[in-house]
Image (cartoon, rainbow, N blue to C red):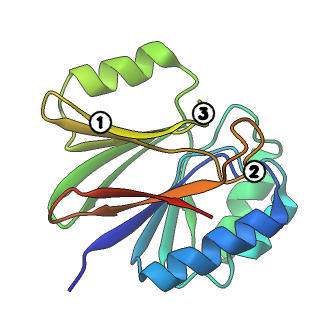
Amino acid sequence: MDHLIGIIADTHDRLPLVNKAVKRLNEEGVKLVMHAGDYIAPFVVSLFKPLKADLIGVFGNNDGDREVLKKRFSDLGAEIRGKFAEVTTDGLRIGMVHGEEEELLRSLVQVEGYDVIVHGHTHEAKSQKQGRTLVVNPGEVCGYLTGKSTIATLNTQTLDVKIITL
């Protein structure tokens, strides 16, 4: 069985693309989705309702009403943890930040305390190994900066990352 988790970031209220991302994550059969922040407005939350996976997120630097975002997501059974989340799944320790604090991100990667670090913010999709840590940025769902709407999946057994263009 595939041990896939979905990784998304920077949805920035782009509703049609959020719908596409949720649909694609369901098609991929992910059991957990990690959202590295920048949802923006609370009205976007309802679009995650059809998601057939657990959702854990962190806040980004552009997120608006955090209390309302937190509450709306928790009403869906999802969890927004603040500025940092540590998730253990399939024996992997995963740390997640939005990534606007570059020094913090760099430090989390360099300390090699996590198997995987997930972040967003730069809107550039990439995954690379730094020491023993896999660093994954799923790019931007919104497609505003790069013109490409992307999400990522991570196989927790093989550590294969797939960047998916929506």
Numbered badge on residue 121: 3
Question: In the image, residue 156 lies at what x, y percent?
Answer: 22, 63
Instruction: Quadrant for the N terminus, please.
Output: bottom left
- What is the spatial separation of the Cα atoms under label 2 and label 3, in whole angstroms? 21 Å
Q: Within 10 Å of the Cα at label 2, are there few (<14), some (14-19), or many (20+) other Cα atoms?
A: few
CB atoms at circles 1 and 3 under 8 Å apart?
no
CB atoms at circles 1 and 2 under 8 Å apart?
no
| Mark 1 or mark 2, earlier in chain | 2
CB atoms at circles 2 and 3 under 8 Å apart?
no
Q: Answer left or right for 5 relative to 12.
A: left
Q: Answer left or right for 72 relative to 133.
A: right
| Mark 1 or mark 3, earlier in chain | 3
Instruction: Quadrant for the C terminus, please.
Output: bottom right
- What is the spatial separation of the Cα atoms under label 1 and label 3, in whole angstroms? 16 Å
In the image, farthest residue toward the top:
103
Question: In the image, residue 66 lies at what x, y percent?
Answer: 75, 46
Q: Which residue is mark 1?
A: 128
Residue 132's quadrant in the figure?
Answer: top left
Q: Residue at x 60, y 33 (%)?
A: 121
- What is the spatial separation of the Cα atoms under label 1 and label 2, in whole angstroms? 33 Å
Is 1 in front, or is 43?
1
Q: Within 10 Å of the Cα at label 1, are there few (<14), some (14-19), or many (20+) other Cα atoms?
A: few
Q: Residue at x 72, y 65 (%)?
A: 18
Q: Which residue is mark 2?
A: 67
Q: Is residue 98 above or below residue 16?
A: above
Q: Amino acid at mark 1?
A: Gln
